């Protein structure tokens, strides 16, 4: 199988920690097929003169070609239209990539995109130029959020039903894709994986000693982008209230984003760690008593998969694919989104539960990235064979 993958959700020299879930799945896929990866950099011409706030990433820091875990990646530049991305993002994305894609005509069997808009919609147009089928993986807010925005919704409703296959990372997301006009028979579930070499049950005391965290304090961990729709505001409010009920509780926050200052202002017993490399996250999970993710919407969040694999119970919101993961009281508790009081109460209850991490990992653990990539490759192969009239 010869696969062309197109996704802006991928690390680069300017953002080395971006989208580790995409990187891990594509690296595993690259070990199972011939894989070409285009990971575009969204740019505004002249933005470094006009002001850094206009640019998503400084393209000058990103080489045209790079390698990640042995996977060769090309970083073409794609025109970005701030404020107009919903309406014009797809044609800009497709036209910017056309001269990179056309030389691959006759050299790939299927186009795969790992984000619906603009990546996936543009990938469909590019697949037509190559004369091969197109498969798009939807991951969460590319459907949950964009399908509610008028310009984005137009593209999603126009393009998604025409795709050869749509890959969803959760049952809830598959149902949402169906409401956009995609026939259920063409939707495949492919769950994300976990790196078992990194994420595994480890001794809590040893992890705390290594990180300099006192052994005798209860600790909650949040890992993610510090955005409003990740529930960071509610988490801060819940923690401030929880401190009055639980005087020794600590909160460790790993991530960066617009609400970083709000997190830093929590002060006493809050450890603001900023963005950390993926390899450091398992030790923080091992050190925690509870991992929390109070998002407003999700696909199948890898932080929950990773926490369970590390044997840590999770307090999260009842959204997207999270209920598929927290399927037993042993694994944690679910609350309504945007409700700081409910989150506070659930965290308080969770800190009172004594549990064996090995039991949590045994019940809540999922497959690794090799298995996830194998399942994805089966979907891609099926799309290619159907397009050729095989089987």
Image (tube, rainbow, N blue to C red):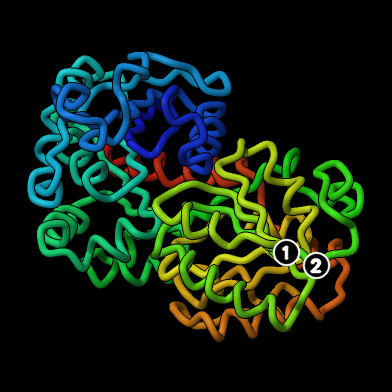
Q: Which mark is residue 218?
A: 2
Residue 210 in sight from this viewpoint: yes
Which sits in the foreground, 34 or 43? 43
The residue sitting at 14% across, 22% down in the picture is 46
Query: Based on the displayed image, in which of its 4 quarters is residue 118 positioned?
Result: top left
Total labels drawn:
2
Give residue 76's position: percent from left, percent from top: 26, 21
Residue 126 position (above or below residue 244) = above
Distance of label 1 from label 2 (alpha carbons): 6 Å
> Which badge, 1 or 2, is on the more N-terminal residue?
2
Relative depth, front residue between 331 and 162? 331
The residue under the point 49% across, 46% down is 256
179 relative position to 260: left or right:
left
Rendered position, 83 above or below 113: below
Q: Is residue 37 left or right of residue 387?
A: right
Q: Considering the numbered disc 1 on the image, is that residue within a helix, a strand or a loop?
A: strand
Inspect this view and state whether residue 377 appears.
Answer: no
Residue receiving disc 1:
250
Residue 109, how many percent across, how many down?
32, 29
Q: Residue 4: name its quadrant.
A: top left
Q: Residue at x 36, y 19 (%)?
A: 62
Q: Quadrant of the C terminus?
A: top left
Task: Indicate the quadrant containing the N terminus: top left, top right, bottom left or bottom right.
Answer: top left
Q: Do tag 1 and tag 2 residues touch (Cβ < 8 Å)?
A: yes
- In the shown orientation, is residue 162 left or right of residue 343? left
Find residue 359 and name its label. Answer: none
Q: Residues within 10 Å of mark 2 (few under 14, many from 20)?
A: some
Determine the residue positioned at 38% across, 26% down.
37
Q: Position of residue 87 (x, y in %)?
A: 8, 50
């Amino acid at each position: 199988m010869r696969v062309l993958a197109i996704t802006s959700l991928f690390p680069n020299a300017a953002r080395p920690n971006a989208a580790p879930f995409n990187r891990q799945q594509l690296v595993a896929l690259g070990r199972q097929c011939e894989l070409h990866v285009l990971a575009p950099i969204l740019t505004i011409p002249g933005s470094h003169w006009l002001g850094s706030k206009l640019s998503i990433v400084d393209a000058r820091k990103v080489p045209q070609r790079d390698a990640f875990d042995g996977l060769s990646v090309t970083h073409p530049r794609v025109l970005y239209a701030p404020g107009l991305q919903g309406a014009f993002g797809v044609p800009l994305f497709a036209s910017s990539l056309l001269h990179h894609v056309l030389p691959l005509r006759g050299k790939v069997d299927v186009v795969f995109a790992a984000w619906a808009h603009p990546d996936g919609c543009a990938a469909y147009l590019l697949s037509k130029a190559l004369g091969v089928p197109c498969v798009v993986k939807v991951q969460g807010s590319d459907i949950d959020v964009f399908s509610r925005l008028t310009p984005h919704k137009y593209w999603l409703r126009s393009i998604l039903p025409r795709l050869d296959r749509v890959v969803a990372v959760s049952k809830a997301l598959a149902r949402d894709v169906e409401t956009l006009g995609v026939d259920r028979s063409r939707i495949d579930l492919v769950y994300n994986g976990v790196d078992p070499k990194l994420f595994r049950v480890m001794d809590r005391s040893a992890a705390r000693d290594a990180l300099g965290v006192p052994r005798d304090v209860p600790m909650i961990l949040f890992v993610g982008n510090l955005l409003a729709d990740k529930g960071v505001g509610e988490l801060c409010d819940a923690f401030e209230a929880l401190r009055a009920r639980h005087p020794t509780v600590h909160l460790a926050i790993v991530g960066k984003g617009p609400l970083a200052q709000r997190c830093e202002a929590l002060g006493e017993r809050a450890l603001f760690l900023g963005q950390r490399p993926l390899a450091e996250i398992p030790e923080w999970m091992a050190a925690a008593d509870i991992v929390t993710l109070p998002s407003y919407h999700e696909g199948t969040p890898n932080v929950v998969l990773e926490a369970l694999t590390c044997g840590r119970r999770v307090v999260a919101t009842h959204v997207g694919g999270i209920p598929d993961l927290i399927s037993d009281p042993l694994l944690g508790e679910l609350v309504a989104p945007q409700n700081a009081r409910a989150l506070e109460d659930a965290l308080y209850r969770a800190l009172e539960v004594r549990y064996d991490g090995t039991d949590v990992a045994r019940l809540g653990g999922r497959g690794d990235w090799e298995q996830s990539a194998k399942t994805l490759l089966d979907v891609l192969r099926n799309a290619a064979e159907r397009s050729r009239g095989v089987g």
